[in-house]
Amino acid sequence: MDKIILLDQLQSLRLKLHEIAEARGSLTDPDVLAVSEEADQLIVALQQMQRDEMIGSSMRRKND
């Protein structure tokens, strides 16, 4: 998946998380937690992408 798309999705989830938490008045509401977990998954995917980019860049430098 494209990094820009993931970042856009993460930003949307962040806004949704804020709206739901404010509406429910609780950070432990099940809906808030569900959106938070979804955001966590995107964060992990972005971190893996970044790690893979760094490893790929390092490998290319070694091969030059």
Image (spheres, rainbow, N blue to C red):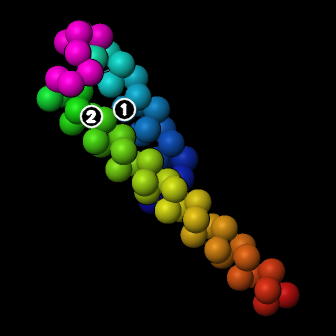
Amino acid at circle 1: Leu
Mark 2 surroundings: few (<14), some (14-19) or many (≥20) residues within 10 A? some
Percent of width and height locating residue 40: 36, 45
What residue is shown with label 1? Answer: 13
- For the C terminus, the quadrant is bottom right
Residue 14 image-quadrant placement: top left
Q: Residue at x 23, y 15 (%)?
A: 26
Quadrant in the rendering for residue 33: top left
Q: Which residues are magenta?
A: 22-29
What residue lies at 23% left-to-right and 9% top-to-bottom?
25
Residue 47 horizontal/vertical position (percent): 51, 56
Q: Is residue 2 visible?
A: no
Would you place residue 57 above or below residue 46 in this image?
A: below
For residue 45, side relative to residue 28 (left or right): right
Verify whether residue 4 appears in magenta: no
19 versus 12 height, above or below: above
As for residue 23 lying within the magenta part, the answer is yes
Q: Residues within 10 Å of mark 1 (few under 14, many from 20)?
A: some
Q: Amino acid at mark 2?
A: Val
Report the residue that reaches farthest toward the bottom.
Answer: 63
Q: Are marks 1 and 2 in contact (CB under 8 Å)?
A: yes
Q: Which mark is residue 35?
A: 2
Residue at horizontal 43 percent and vertical 56 percent from the top: 45
SS state under label 1: helix
Helix, strand or loop at label 2? It is helix
C-alpha gap between disc 1 and disc 2: 7 Å
Per the rendering, the mark at residue 59 is none
Q: Identify the residue at horizontal 80%, vertical 80% (top origin).
A: 61
In the depicted view, which residue is nearer to us: 34 or 10? Answer: 34
Horizontal and vertical percent position of residue 2:
50, 56
User: Which badge, 1 or 2, comes first in the chain's sequence?
Assistant: 1
